[in-house]
Amino acid sequence: MKEPIIEITGLTKKYGNFTAVDHLNLTIRKGEVFGLLGPNGAGKSTTILMLLGLTEPTEGSVSVCGFNSASQPIQVKKMAGYLPENVGFYEDRTGFDNLVYTAKLNGFTSKQAEEQAWDVLKRVGMTNEAKKLTGKYSRGMRQRLGLANVLIKNPQVIILDEPTLGLDPSGIRELLDLIVQLSREDGITVLFSSHHLHQVQRVCDRVGLFVKGKLLDEGDIQSLSKRLFADKPVIITIGSDSFPQRLQSADFSKLEKRLKEIESINAINIVDERLVLTCSSDVTAEIAKLFVTFDYPLNHLVKREYGLDDIYNLYFEGGVKNEE
C-alpha cells in the first residue's frame, strides 16, 4: 500500500456558532485520485483552504507531504498546486509569459522557467496557443492554462475545483485523461471537486461524501455501493431471442416454475419481452445455468448495479436523514 500523502485528523473549522467542517478524519495516499463530493455548503471548500494553509483550523490537524498546513504553510504551498473554479491571468501577456512568471516566482531561473513552461504547455496540449494573449483565450483554454500553471512547480498534490467547467466534450475527455495520467504515470495525488457525477466516477479511485461539514462516508464506488445498498433487492434483467415466441409456451412455464424454486428470487415480472427478477441475493450464475439447461439462448443478462448517481441521491436528495 502506498504511503499517505495527506493526513487529516479531527479537523474542525468554526465561524462563530457555525461549524463549516466537523471533526474530519481522512487519509489520502500517493498517486490517488480522490473525489470531494457534496452540495454547496458541505464543507469542501473550507477543507481545501485548510489543506493549503490558507485558513487555520479551530481544532485538529492536517498535513500534506509531511508538513503541517497550519504551522508550515509555505512548505505545503511548495508541494501542492491549486486550480480554483475561476482562474486569473495577466490578460495582456501570453500564456507562455504567464507560466514563465509563475515559474520564476517558484524559484526557477529564466532558462529553467522557459523550459518548464514549454514542457507543461505540451502536457496540457496548449503549445499552439502559447504565444496568444490570455485575454483572447476561451474558457476552455484558460482552464488548460490553469492546469499548466498548477503543474509548473512539479507538485506532488494538485487540487482541482470544477476543472472541466466551460470545456466542450472533447476537451473534457482530454482533461480527464490527463488527470488519470498524472496519477498513474507521474504519481501525483489529485483532489477532484466536481458536481458532475459521471466525471467523478470515471477518474476517482475513491470519493468522500460531504454533508453539513461532516464526512459521512468514503471509499471506492463499489465498496460504497455494497455498504449503502446491502439491504436493497438485487434486480436481474434477462433477455433471449426465444422470448417473443416462447413466453406463452409450456416449456417456459416449466422454466418459470424452476425459477420460483430458487429461494432468493422473490418476484418474476415480464417487461417488454424481458424477464425482470427481484432477488434477495445475487443468483446470476444459477439463473444463467438454468436458462442454458432449458435451451434458451441469452443475449441479455444484467444485474442492477448501484453507481454514484444512486449514492448521491441517497445522501443528498432526501434518501438519508443526517444528524444535525
Image: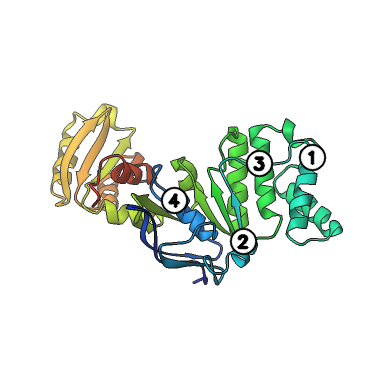
Q: Quadrant of residue 182?
A: bottom right
**Residue drawn at the location 71% of the way across and 33% of the way down:** 137
Rendering coords of residue 268 (x, y %): 18, 38
Amino acid type shown at disc 3? Gly
Q: Please tell me the numbered disc located at residue 94.
A: 1
Amino acid type of the residue tagged 2 in the rendering? Lys
- Percent x, y of residue 252: 19, 36
Residue occupying the point 32% across, 35% down: 240
Q: Earlier in the sequence, mark 3 or mark 4?
A: 4
Q: Nearer the viewer, residue 176 or 121?
A: 121
Quickly name the residue at label 2: 77
Q: Residues within 10 Å of mark 1 (few under 14, many from 20)?
A: many
4 and 2 marks in contact (CB < 8 Å): no
Which residue carries the number 3 mark? 88
Q: Nearer the viewer, residue 291 or 267?
A: 267
Image height of 8 relative to 163, above or below: below
Q: Position of residue 169 (x, y in %)?
A: 58, 34
Disc number lying in front (3 or 4): 3
Closer to the observer: label 3 or label 1? 3
Res 78 visible = yes
Q: Earlier in the sequence, mark 4 or mark 1?
A: 4
- 289 to the left or right of 174: left
Q: Earlier in the sequence, mark 3 or mark 1?
A: 3
- Residue nearer the viewer, 169 or 189: 189
